[in-house]
Image (cartoon, rainbow, N blue to C red):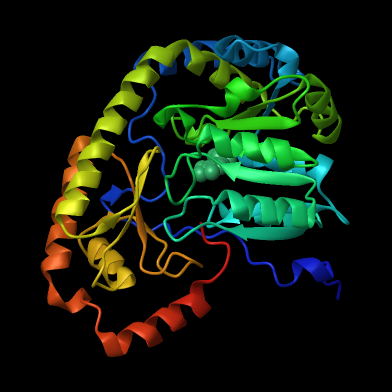
Amino acid sequence: MISVRDDLRALQGYHSAQVDVRIRLNTNESPEPPPTAFRDAMAAEVSNIEWNRYPDRAAVALREAIAESHSVDVAQVFVANGSNEVLQTVLLAYAGPGRTVATFEPTYQLHAQIARVTGATVVEGQRADDFTLDPNEVERVITGSQPHVVFLTSPNNPTGLVEPMERVRQILDLAPGLVVVDEAYAQFSDWSALELIDEDTPMVVTRTFSKTWSMAGARLGYLIGPSWLVAELDKVVLPYHLDAVKQIAGRLALRFASDMDDRVRQTVAERTRISSTLADLGTTVFPSGANFVLFRPDGHEGRAVWQGLVDRSVLIRDCSGWPRLANCLRVTVGTPDENSAFLDALGEVLADRSTRLQLSLQTSSETSLETSQNGADQ
Ligand SMILES: *Cc1c(COP(=O)(O)O)cnc(C)c1O
């Protein structure tokens, strides 16, 4: 029987538990649906689609709307089915066999995953214990491996940390190839690498409609970058990859930017409330510029705390078995009511002695979690 490519055999797929619970705060979506006016406008336009015809291959109207929203040229915009497909297209064009891709761990696991699927070699730099990126480590990795593509995620997932502009500039100075800044959560932070984009800089910034725009169901993402690079991506991506419905959805969503800004403000306020309550509950909280918070319930077993929350019908992300993230959990900022339910449930779980970490148990449980869960679970 035919077997899969040798280099893919050891690769694990992407996993995210989808448990049936009342409160789902595990995948960083917006807790609210798009505005009603968006749904109405969408329904009206969808009824006029010419279903027998292929969609606009270049998605011109959508690209123009995105370009206008960022004050860039339409030729600097590339759109695909979720920012994951944007990243895949970038890696098909600029990574592949014989090429090297650098990441700084822990970070979004799909960067390394997609790079490996294209056949590239991945070099993993390591963040410091507080998950900041040390300039010496940046220099060691980039000068040492001369990567064709370097990934940064800002704010980083799953840590929430915003990369300072000087770190992006340092990487641009050192990198011999392309720099990709994944800004899936940029609207929740206070600066964007978009201001560094120009035709002479080999850098792209990727964005998504999945998180801020309440449109995870539509699968739509894009990048802003030099027009010569966008032209290469247009060659690589499949013809007519963006269906007509999605092109309409993205274009109409951008008309509701001020509704989106209001939601972002509420999310940021709730993030502050969650972070300070988590600290009051005695957990270690990592500073976040995103719509989620990473925390470590010190003195408790992370996996048991996660299970205790599931038992109370609250689902968050269990990162406790991921490399470098022992005992860490990640919660998405939801509606104020959902957040209060999460915090109340966590208070109960932490008051319950059964999740306490026993010293004799600590080593063996962490080891077994790491061997069973190690991999691409993000
Ligand atoms: C969620 C996420 C994405 C995925 O975005 P899609 O547009 O839904 O494919 C990309 N990058 C990061 C860092 C994410 O957290």
Residue 120 in the image, given as x and y percentages of width and height: 80, 56
Front residue of 220 and 66? 66
How many numbered marks does the figure carry?
0
Residue displayed at 25% across by 31% down: 269
Q: Decide: is 28 above or below 255.
A: below
Is 23 in front, or is 121? 121
Q: Is residue 209 left or right of residue 283?
A: right
Quadrant where the N terminus sits is bottom right
> Residue at position x 47%, y 27% from top?
191
Vertical placement of 285 versus 309: above or below? above
Dividing the image into four equal quarters, which quarter contains ligand 1?
A: top right
* Image x and y of residue 97, in percent: 87, 56
Percent x, y of residue 126: 57, 60
Q: Residue at x 55, y 12 (%)?
A: 69
Is 120 on the left or on the right of 358, as rendered?
A: right
Does any portion of residue 82 appear in the rendered image?
A: no
Task: Name above or below for residue 41 compared with residue 124.
Answer: above
| 209 with respect to 313 (left or right) | right
In front: 244, or 266?
Answer: 266
Residue 59 in sight in this render: yes
Q: Which quarter of the picture shows residue 270?
A: top left
Indicate the quadrant where residue 291 lies.
top left
On the image, the x and y values in percent for residue 145 come to: 78, 56
Q: Residue at x 84, y 51 (%)?
A: 96
Farthest residue in the bottom direction? 360
